[in-house]
Image: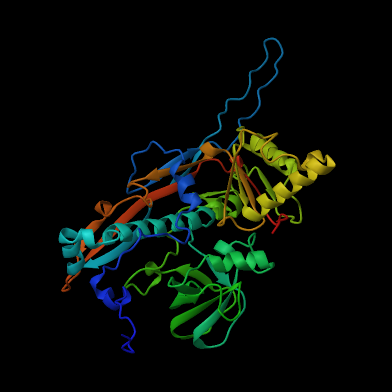
Amino acid sequence: MATGTTPAYTSVANLANLMQVTNTSVKTGIKLVTEEAKWFRDYPREKIVVSGNQNRIPLVLTYPTGPGMIVDGGYENTLSSPAPTYGTFMPVQMNKRYSYTGLAQALDNKSRAGMIERQTAYQAAMAASSMGRALGLQTYGSAAGTVAAVLTTGSASATQVVPLKNAFGSTVWPGSTTTAQQTYISSLFRVGDVIALIHSAAILEFGTVTAAPSATSGVGYIDVTFNSSITPTAGDLIVFANIVTDATLTGTDQNNWPVGFADALTATSVHGVSDATYTNWAPGYANTSGGIRFGFLIKEAMANGIWNAAGVKMDRIILSQGVRRDVIDGQRGALRYDDSEEMDLEGELEKFEYLTSQLVPPGTAIGYYSQAVSKVELSAQPDNEMGPSIFKLDKVQDRSAMAASYDYFYARIYSSRGALAYATGMTESP
């Protein structure tokens, strides 16, 4: 008999609180690896017992004088031998920390089955990724630690849209002349980075990056909230300052980076040796004319320059991604039109190792002999697979928390600037 009621049923949603909340494994939706960190792992290691006083790199930079052709019984050649000189280095220290509470430690000890991934293992991997990116930036940077400079003078405010120029403080990577350059220079910063503006060799102010690129002005700019109202001035230097407490220059990265390509390719003095004193202490080849396509002729010029200056064979080439795409585009055209000039990314110079990364400055190619760039390490290079056990633990004063810290001590050494070659301003393909 009909009762006028509808059949009742109980859905899963009605009793959802009886169900567990489950998860897949943690997925990574962003790039956490840095190619340059992998390259650094393969650098030859110097055999040296590192001193806290001074570490020297003996360098032969002066050619011997010629022999004499003498008559029978004549006077002999002058007595001479060129004196070597030396450069110096001191390892730098990269420090990265994270923290966890007493509760997190208890959960790790007794309730690890309730974790999708161990908290401390995740934190250690993120710390390693951060250090790897720093190694990548430092590959192209300089010992001065400059990341960029202010392009134009602004007006007084604590909240600033900062226009940028001169990646790593070098005019060969202007950062403001093309969209690719502007995109690159603002990408050197990440939201949350603490920076310092340095004006006339003194701290102007500290600030935190809130958008990179700028939310309002786009690429070539970053948004920064400073600790007080300041006026950024054209030419002010921008350095990272991800250090606690210290509000002086020593609390910044200034003069705390290792020697990088900005030094080795363009600076007057590297490792304390000046090319004004030793003219052979200079890159084997440099081309900053711009507007050229990277093809076999440029590669051959680089190889010739390195061989003529240092007597070694170039076996590495670093290309910006846009330059590499342009080379590939040229290869396709060569296959169609039989243009042998553009036929050769892996052919004629097939023994080379071609490297590329998004951190390579736009329009740039760097060639070098792999044994001319080496490293010294006093601790293991961090990587994304290292676990929390490698970190040193310290109790946070008066808090139920622990601070985990890792220190990486290392140096990058250039033993022959003549074994380096570079070209900038080259054609890129989108």
In this view of the protein, can residue 378 be seen by the observer?
A: yes
x and y, in percent, of residue 303 in the image: 67, 38
**Count the marks: how many?**
0
Question: Between 135 and 418, which is closer to the camera in this rendering?
Answer: 135
Residue extending furthest toward the front: 1
Colouring mode (rainbow / by chain / secondary structure / one colour): rainbow
Is 218 left or right of 251, judged from the image as shown? right
Q: Quadrant of residue 369?
A: top right
Looking at the image, which is closer to me, 323 or 10?
Answer: 10
Q: Residue at 74% of width from left, 55% of height from top?
A: 289
Q: In this view, does 358 lie above or below 162?
A: above
Image quarter (top left, top right, bottom left or bottom right) of the N terminus? bottom left
The answer to whether residue 90 is visible is no
Q: Where is residue 204 in the image (x, y as percent from the top left)?
A: 46, 78
- Residue 419 x/y as whole percent: 59, 40
Locate the C terminus by quadrant. Answer: bottom right
Residue shown at the point (56%, 73%) measured from the top left: 213
Instruction: Residue at 49%, 79% (x, y): give it.
Output: 224
Left or right of 289? Residue 309 is left
Vertical relation: 211 (above or below) 83: below
Q: Which of 311 and 34 is in front in this view?
A: 34
Q: Is residue 192 above or below residue 40?
A: below
Q: In this view, does 249 lie to the left or right of 323?
A: left
Of 262 and 74, which appears nearest the observer? 262
Extreme residue toward the right, this view: 337
User: In the rendering, at what x and y percent does residue 48 appear?
Assistant: 37, 38
